Amino acid sequence: MSRVGTGSSSAGQPGPRHDPVRLPLPPAPCRGTTAATLLLNATFEPLCVVSSRRAIVLVLAEKAVSVDSSPDVVRAESVTVPVPVVARLTRYVRVPYPTQVPLSRRAVFTRDGQTCVYCGGSATSIDHVVPRSRGGTHTWDNVVAACRRCNHTKADRSLAEMGWKLPQPPRTPSGAAWRLLGHRTVDPRWREWLGVPDSVSA
Ligand SMILES: [Zn+2]
């Protein structure tokens, strides 16, 4: 839902590559803009997460259009802008993605559905399948979400020694959505664009 500038602007210039928009920031709003906005590329591919304040600047500059907005509005000069929850760039930006999704506790929890891979309980720690003391690496294919109890019980033993099995081999997640999930809290309203299951919460 966009009420602001749906036309593309500044055509003919080289593609913007996250160029800062040099516009005066709207006056500090009273509420609603401490939130984050999911920024999509012109092709609707998730690109990154920006502050809602930054998203508003992009919308005002007609560099982005609001795709989904919150009931909150920000008044800037003569316009009233709904705070974007999801915004889409009006021009395609080519982004060289790193091939590896950053390995973080939050990302591992997200991949494993916030549950312990051994018992299905709530995940509270990261377990190295092959213990680090036995040469196990801190890599996607050797880390899993685990509850503290299972982690403690397993300690420095291998799965074979424990007689435990993994439901599936741990894998490196891929795709733009996972890059975002690695370090952000996911707004439920982004899910449609990120292609993540409802069970994922961050
Ligand atoms: Zn467990």
Image (tube, rainbow, N blue to C red):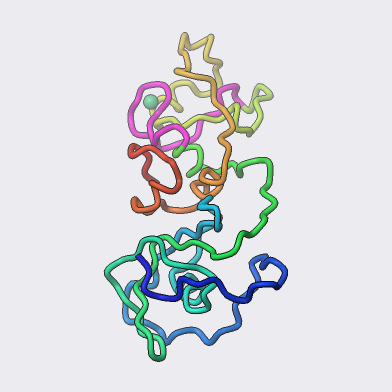
Q: Residue furthest right?
A: 14
Which of the four quarters of the rendered structure image does ligand 1 lie in? top left
- In the rendered image, the residue lying farthest to the bottom is 77
Q: Residue 44 appears at what percent x and percent y?
A: 50, 52
- The residue under the point 43% across, 30% down is 146
Within the magenta stretch, is there residue 127? yes
Q: Quadrant of the N terminus?
A: bottom left
The image quadrant that residue 91 belongs to is bottom right
Residue situated in front as seen by the camera: 179 or 160 = 179
Q: Foreground: 84 or 118?
A: 84
Q: Residue at x 48, y 70 (%)?
A: 55
Q: Is residue 93 magenta?
A: no
Q: Would you identify the image quadrant in which residue 134 lies?
A: top right
Q: Where in the figure is residue 158, as x and y percent of width and height?
A: 56, 16
Nearest to the observer: residue 48 or residue 100: 48
Range shown magenta = 111-131
At 56% across and 35% down in the image, what residue appears? 173
In front of the other: 150 or 37: 37
Residue 166, relative to residue 71: is it above or below? above
Position of residue 100 in the picture relative to residue 180 (left or right): right
The answer to whether 95 is drawn above or below residue 108 in the figure is: below
- Note whether 102 is above or below 68 in the view shown: above
